[in-house]
Image (cartoon, helix red, strand yellow):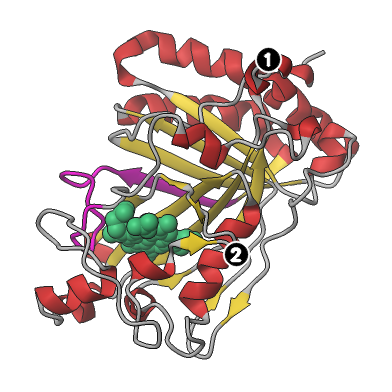
Amino acid sequence: MSEARRVPIEPQRVDAPLTRSAVFLVLTVEDTQEAVATVRSVLGALADVTKNVAFRDLAASLSCTVGVGAALWPKVFGTDLPRELHEFTPIRGAVHTAVSTPGDLLFHIRADRRDLCFELERQLVDLLGDAVAVADETEGFRYFDARDLLGFVDGTANPVGAALPEATLVGHEDPAFAGGSYVVVQKYVHPLDAWRSLTTEQQEAVMGRTKPDSIELDDAAPEAQKSHKTLATIVDESGDEHDILRDNMPFGAPAQGEFGTYFIGYARRLWVIERMLERMFIGDPPGLHDRLLDFSTPLTGSAFFAPSATLLESLAD
Ligand code: HEM
């Protein structure tokens, strides 16, 4: 019998399509029993609340994924933590640091219409009331053909088809949490003038792909400066490559000089994202960090677990 039939669980819409608009809402939860009870009831009702808004334009593909941080997990679920879940550990390279910032809940709202994202966020914030405080609220948008504000197509190497659940959903290795997914978010800002002072060829060498058509460039020699693409490729001791799903979105306010990329990665194994970050911030070999970081500064960094929809709905009981 296949694993999917043995474990009748339904994941959240981790695999929702890349949309035109997204909201990334990171919240902290007040440390009171009432606040935790409110959160529990909102999470238990999340699928229904989302369905109510989504139904107003089914073609707009509204979805909402919620992630829960390590400190909040036992209070809400009353169980042990998913095996790898812990707070985001800062990663200090010689030049750049991946900071760790507070976050108990992450709502990742996606739709092809900005107003649907807005409406769902409004209803959730209303329901949560003073049980929560906002750590960060970022509104992302699709920029041309899924480009980041550095001008590159972002998301090309994402897994598709059968490789997608394989890369993103916990399976038999942690049965109580099967169908869930680890999620890491980081909000990056870019000094665009400095980036623009590079030639297109220099920018392509940083990324490891061509700019107009996103074609992969060859990897550098083992001891040489590696591109972002190569540093973010994780191969284990057995030679198996481990993918993650990214749904990065540009955000910004040109008149304020704010130009950013909101990074979000979903993974079956948290260590895969952590290893990517180590290779980017510390470098491989150490000292040769990802040159993308010379043009991208993380302002936030938090880790969560997005439980299966089945586990979420059990909170309503
Ligand atoms: C690839 C942009 C941060 C993981 C790429 C590509 C671009 C890009 C343009 C090549 C096209 C593609 O395959 O999507 C950015 C920007 C970032 C950022 C602008 C932030 C400022 C990160 C972080 C991680 C990451 C923090 C992981 C922790 C990956 C992976 C790939 C990738 C796994 C695919 C590598 C492969 O070819 O297999 N990124 N990225 N990225 N990035 Fe990033």
In the rendered view of the protein, which quadrant contains the N terminus? Answer: top right
Give how far across and how far down residue 234 sits, in percent: 49, 62
Q: Earlier in the sequence, mark 1 or mark 2?
A: 1
Q: Which dot marks residue 277? A: none
Query: Label 2 CB, ligand 1: below 8 Å?
Result: no
Q: Residue at left 72%, top 59%?
A: 87
Q: Are marks 1 and 2 in contact (CB under 8 Å)?
A: no
Q: Kindly state the secondary structure of the residue where label 2 is placed.
A: loop
Q: Residue at left 48%, top 86%?
A: 285
**Depth check: 95 or 176 in front?**
176
Q: Residue at left 80%, top 42%?
A: 73
**The magenta stretch spans which residues?**
135-153
User: In screen coordinates, is 281 left or right of 110?
Assistant: right
Amino acid marked by disc 2 = Glu
User: In screen coordinates, is 20 left or right of 35?
Assistant: left
Give how far across and how far down residue 176 sits, in percent: 80, 31
Residue 145 belongs to the span the image colors magenta: yes
- How busy is the neighbourhood of tag 2: few (under 14 within 10 Å), some, or many (20 plus)? few
**Depth check: 10 or 110 in front?**
10
Which residue position is annotated with label 2? 237
Give how far across and how far down residue 275 sits, in percent: 57, 66
Q: Where 92 sits versus 174, above or below?
A: below
**Depth check: 249 or 223 in front?**
223
Q: Where 255 sits versus 28, above or below?
A: below
User: In screen coordinates, is 118 left or right of 275?
Assistant: left
Q: Where 147 sits versus 287, above or below?
A: above
Q: Which dot marks residue 1? A: 1
In the rendered view of the protein, which quadrant contains the C terminus? Answer: top right
Q: Kindly state the secondary structure of the residue where label 1 is placed.
A: loop
Residue 31 belongs to the span the image colors magenta: no
Whether residue 251 is visible to the viewer of this picture, yes or no, is no
Q: Main secondary structure of the magenta part?
A: loop
